[in-house]
Amino acid sequence: MNLMTRIALACALAAAAAVTTNATAAAPLRSDHPIVGTWRFVLPDGSCHEVYRMRADGTALITSAAEVVETEFAIDDQPDENGFYKSRDKIVKDNGKHDCTGQISQVGHSVASFILFHPSGDMFLMCLQRSMEACLGPFIRVKGSET
């Protein structure tokens, strides 16, 4: 996937988050769920990065450029037969500043995505469908003080 396609996909995912309005309630996850932890995504051109702190209580803190967002999320406990976890994420707080795509997230909006983990557990892709045709990533697990 070329740089422009990846940037367009990042914008599409951000736009989807701003227009989908399904409710999501935070629900505790098992402590060893693969999504729990801190993840970093760098835009393909290296100009910006996002950090996702995914907590076992079903909440997340996300930073993207100047934006700071708090979300509630739900994710399948186990992957489907193709390895995808369905995830739903709802924005509950936002500082009103621009993210890496130049957007400002709207409180109350939700987005559904499909998470596909690398076998190592240290990377994942976030996809619009249960397919690798339209994905954002990789998100890389952050260990220690790498944030």
Image (cartoon, grey):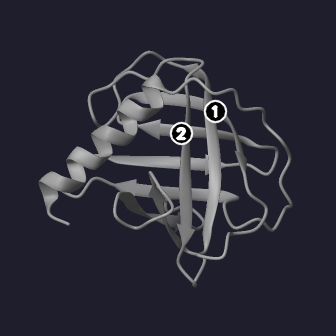
Q: Nearer the viewer, residue 65 or 2?
A: 2
Q: Is residue 73 left or right of residue 21?
A: right
Q: Which residue is mark 2?
A: 62
- Seen in the picture, residue 137 relative to 13 is either above or below; the reply is below
Horizontal side of residue 76 vs 38, given as left or right: right
| Rendered view: 60 above or below 99 | below
Residue, x 62% and y 30% (percent of image)? 90
Q: Is residue 46 visible?
A: no
- Quarter of the image where one finds residue 88: top right
The residue nearer to you, when weighing 51 against 30, is 30
What crowding class fits label 1: few (fewer than 14 Cα within 10 Å), some (14-19), or many (20 or more)?
A: many
Whether residue 55 is visible here, answered yes or no, is yes
Q: Alpha carbon of mark 1 to alpha carbon of mark 2: how far?
A: 8 Å
Type of amino acid at the residue the image marks with label 1: Thr
Picture coordinates of residue 137 (x, y %)? 39, 61
Please state the total of marks drawn on the protein image: 2
Q: Quadrant of the N terminus?
A: bottom left
The disc at residue 126 is none
Residue under the image location 29 percent in, 38 percent down:
11
Residue bearing the label numbered 1: 71
Residue 35 pos. (x, y %):
66, 60
Is disc 1 in contact with disc 2, using a CB cutoff of under 8 Å? Answer: yes
Which sits in the foreground, 37 or 74? 74
Q: Residue at x 73, y 49 (%)?
A: 55
Q: Residue at x 71, y 32 (%)?
A: 24
Dot 1: what SS?
A: strand
User: Helix, strand or loop at disc 2?
Assistant: strand
Query: Where, by quadrant of the figure, is residue 69 drawn?
Result: top right
Rendering coords of residue 57 (x, y %):
82, 44
Q: Residues within 10 Å of mark 2 (few under 14, many from 20)?
A: some
